[in-house]
């Protein structure tokens, strides 16, 4: 599902594609025409292997080492959707400062 998102958290509007699977990790892609090839390498918390200029597949959670931050049994509107808005907020800060303030590993 492709949606346009905006929030009080950040300026502007972003296109986001949510691809959900029954038994696989969901894929969330954020589209931003300002993302160039050299910038893809610098953006934190994305899957660089699946990101190209203009679009990045974002990493929102970590399931490993006994941790389970997300599962397909969890409510999309209470997890992935707000986490995506937060990622965009921290991405905008990153674009301005060059530092990632969103935490994560």
Image (cartoon, rainbow, N blue to C red):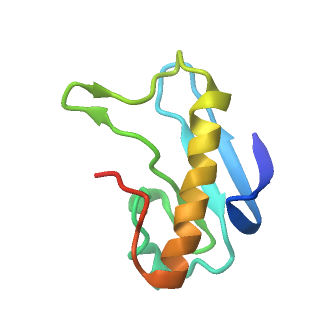
Query: Looking at the image, which residue is at 62% across and 42% down?
Result: 82
Decide which of 49, 96 is in the foreground and name it.
96
Residue 69, by quadrant, is: top left
Query: Looking at the image, which residue is at 49% across and 20% down?
Result: 23
Is residue 27 shown above or below 34?
above
Is residue 71 shown above or below 41?
above
Query: Looking at the image, which residue is at 54% across and 56% down?
Result: 87
62 relative position to 13: left or right: left
Q: Residue furthest left?
A: 65
59 relative position to 15: left or right: left
Q: Position of residue 86 (x, y in %)?
A: 57, 52
Q: Position of residue 55 (x, y in %)?
A: 61, 65
Q: How many marks?
A: 0
Decide which of 43, 23 is in the foreground and name it.
43
Query: Looking at the figure, which quarter contains the N terminus?
Result: top right
33 relative position to 2: left or right: left
């Amino acid at each position: 599902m492709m949606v346009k998102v905006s929030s009080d958290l950040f300026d502007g509007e972003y296109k986001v594609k949510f691809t959900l699977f029954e038994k696989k990790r969901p894929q969330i892609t954020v589209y931003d025409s300002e993302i160039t090839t050299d910038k893809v390498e610098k953006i934190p918390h994305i899957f660089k292997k699946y990101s190209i200029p203009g679009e990045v597949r974002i990493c929102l959670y970590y399931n490993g080492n006994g941790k389970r931050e997300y599962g397909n049994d969890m409510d999309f509107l209470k997890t992935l959707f707000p986490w995506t808005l937060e990622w965009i907020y921290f991405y905008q800060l990153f674009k301005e400062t060059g530092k990632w303030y969103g935490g994560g590993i």
